[in-house]
Amino acid sequence: MSTMPFRFAVQATPQDGPQWLATARRAEDLGYATLMMPDGMQLLSPLPALALAAGATSSLRVGTFVLASALRPPGLAAWDAHSLSVLSGGRFEFGIGTGRPEVVEQAVRLAGQPPTTGAERLARVGQTIDALR
């Protein structure tokens, strides 16, 4: 029977640059494998925040807990995910989903995205994954 490595991740959100860098460095020092960040317009954007965290650490992986497909067109999400993967030396873990109802509402009201159904958002997830491949 082979053993599989067990990894631990921490989920956090940045309040400002110094606090976020300290959080990333502390997570790495404590031995966490990955620093995960949620998505939503009430938070700072996860992609630049995770790029900053990756640049402040040497082995810590960074990832989106769930990037909300309602907030980003598939091609843009794939481009940003690929860019972060390249810039972090392959330490980016891409989590994507359809988004919680309040995030979907924020996408329409605050980001000017068209209203979408759950099925349409799920199709966008598939399009994003296809674009990444």
Image: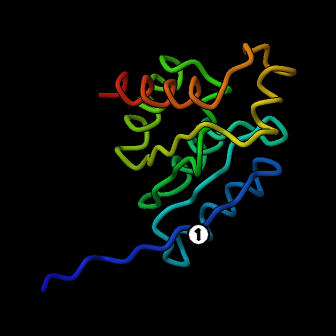
Question: Would you say 3 lies left or right of 115 here?
Answer: left
Image position of 35 with respect to 75: above or below: below
Q: Which residue is mark 1?
A: 27
Q: Quadrant of residue 5?
A: bottom left
Image quadrant holding the C terminus, namely: top left
Type of the residue with mark 1: Ala
Q: Measuring 39% from the left and 30% from the top, which residue is drawn there? A: 129
**How many numbered discs sit on the rendered protein?**
1
Image position of 7 with respect to 131: above or below: below
> How dense is the environment of label 1, judged by Cα within 10 Å: few (below 14), some, or many (20 and up)?
many
Q: Quadrant of residue 87?
A: top left
Q: Residue furthest bottom?
A: 1
Q: Measuring 72% from the left and 43% from the top, which residue is drawn there? A: 100
Image coordinates for residue 119, horizontal then vertical, percent:
57, 28
Image coordinates for residue 9, horizontal then vertical, percent:
53, 68
Which secondary structure, mark 1?
helix
